[in-house]
Every structure is written in C-alpha cells, then in structure tokens.
Image (cartoon, rainbow, N blue to C red):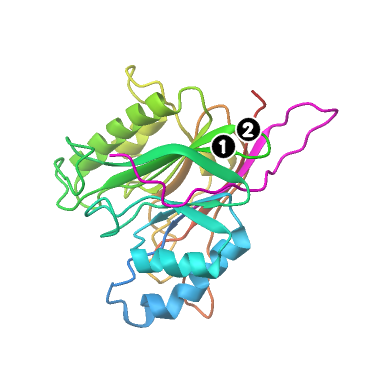
Amino acid sequence: MKISALLLATAAAVFSAGDGAAADLSVKVLSFNIRYGTAADGANAWPHRQEMVFEVIRTQQPDFCGLQEALRFQIDAIRKAVPEYAEYGCGRDDGKTQGEYSAILYREDRWKPDRGETLWLSDTPEQPGSASWGNTIPRIVTWGRFVDKQTGRALCVFNTHFDHQSQPSRVKSAEFLAKLIARQGRDTPMILTGDFNAGERNPAIEHLKRPDENASARLVDTFRALHPEAESVGTFNGFEGRTDGEKIDYIFADPSVRVTSAEILRTHRDSRYPSDHFPVNAEVVFPDQ
C-alpha cells in the first residue's frame, strides 16, 4: 500500500566539491525508540520527558531520524518542537493515523522524497493491520527514496520495529526486509534504522548482515564498524540507564558506506532518560557514484 505523501520536503546538502567534481554523499542518521506516549510510566510518562526527546533531536540534527513506538500526538509534538523536519510514514493499525508509526523524519531543507511506502511484516504486506508470523500485534517497515535537492543524489531509507515476543516473526521479518532492500535499493545507497528486539547474535540480525543467496542485500552495522570490541552496548535501559543488556537498536547501511562516527547516546538529565531505549546515531559517507 503506497503511502500518500504525508509531507514532501527537501533539505540542505552536506557535501564538498572540489574543482567542480561531484562529491561524496555525507549523511547523519538517528534511530530512536521514543516509548509509547500512552504508557503508564509514572514519573517517566511522556509529558515528563518529551522535552528531553526534543533536545536529543535538536542536538543531533540528523538528516534522517527513524522513530519507533511513535504515536500521532508524539510526532505532532516533535515536529512542532523541531519544525525543520517533515515526516514519512503512517500508523500501523489502519494505514493512516492509528497505532504506532515507524516514521522517518527528514530535513525539509535538504531532502525530497520521490517514492516510498509502508508495508506490514506479514503474509499480506499491503494489508493494513495484518499480522501472520507469530506476532500478536501488527509490525511494519516504512521506507522512502529521498533525493538530495542540491546534488541530485538519491538515498533509500528504511525504518522498522520488529516484534518483541515472537522469534519466528523476527526471522521472517528479517527475510522480508532483506529482499525488500535488495529490490528497492539495488542501484541506490541505503540506510536501515530500527528497534529489532534482537541481539547481535540473533539469527534475524545475522540474516540482515549475511542474507541467503536469494537476497543481494548485505548490511553493515555502523556501530560495529567503528567499535568492534565494545562490550557495554545495551540499548534498552528501562529508564534506569542500564547498559548490561544486548544491543537491539541499530543503524545499518550498505557495504559501500564509510562510517565516520557512531554512538549509543546515553543522554540523561538528573538521572532521568528521554526513553527506555538509548537512541543510536551514525555519520556515514557514501562515495561518489
């Protein structure tokens, strides 16, 4: 099901060109599970932490921000706080505004989407609200092909949130996603953001990094590209700042990428955290085509 263009926009290029030559494509990315705004989290409920969420995005100033667990009113609040961003995506329950979004925020002054869609991670991917792989709630991927207005170079951005309970669903979702990326991003650099609810040795993650012979996508974990030996990498903090768990939030890119920076952001204020997940960022460069 094709998404109606919620907001079309374009954004300021980060590139350098010498002697009139075309430039590499430099992109800043953020992946951020912001935790449902309706969750009964007491002192950590959305009204008490939304300003910290806004501040993370303001400080990072990514070209693209993949949001997970984002409800319509949360996206509205974020876009009011950081109006330089437009959005791409829809709610998973009805394909319109209901339920969680896996929205892609993008800088209006630089990027212009020219196609994309939201698909359901199920046997009927174009059917809103569908779920069929063991997950009891719908899971989605939103993707868009974005064009840098200044350079004309294109980038495919995918954002998703895998199921938190069903391992068969996570594996099937990874298989579906690898094939989707191979099909849509064959001739275009690509980035994948998401909360995968799966650690680095989970078969779902291994499949994305080393898919079967029928899928040409092979993804690079941007964090591990720079920090192969890091051990304290937990990204689910439970509003407590814990780092002892597994890394389940990722920014992947295609093998052409050069990663210049990648972090797990431990942002907090007075022992309070913007979300029960740590956001993750990356700065990447795709070589001149």
Residue 20, quarter of the rendered image:
top right
User: Is 6 colored magenta in this rendering?
Assistant: yes
Q: Is residue 241 above or below residue 224?
A: below
**155 sits left or right of 14 in the view:** left
Q: Earlier in the sequence, mark 2 or mark 1?
A: 1
* Helix, strand or loop under label 2: loop
Q: Residue furthest top?
A: 213
* Helix, strand or loop under label 1: strand
Residue 253, image x, y percentages: 50, 35
**Which of the two residues, 155 or 48, is positioned nearer the viewer here?**
155
Q: Could you tell me how far apart the alpha carbons at marks 2 and 1 are, in whole angstroms?
A: 6 Å
Residue 241 appears in the rendering: no
Which quarter shows the C terminus?
top right
Residue occupying the point 69% across, 32% down: 24
Residue occupying the point 72% across, 39% down: 15
Which quarter shows the N terminus?
top left
- Identify the disc placed on residue 147: 1
Residue 71, image x, y percentages: 33, 63
- Identify the disc placed on residue 152: 2
Residue 125 appears in the rendering: yes
Range shown magenta: 1-30
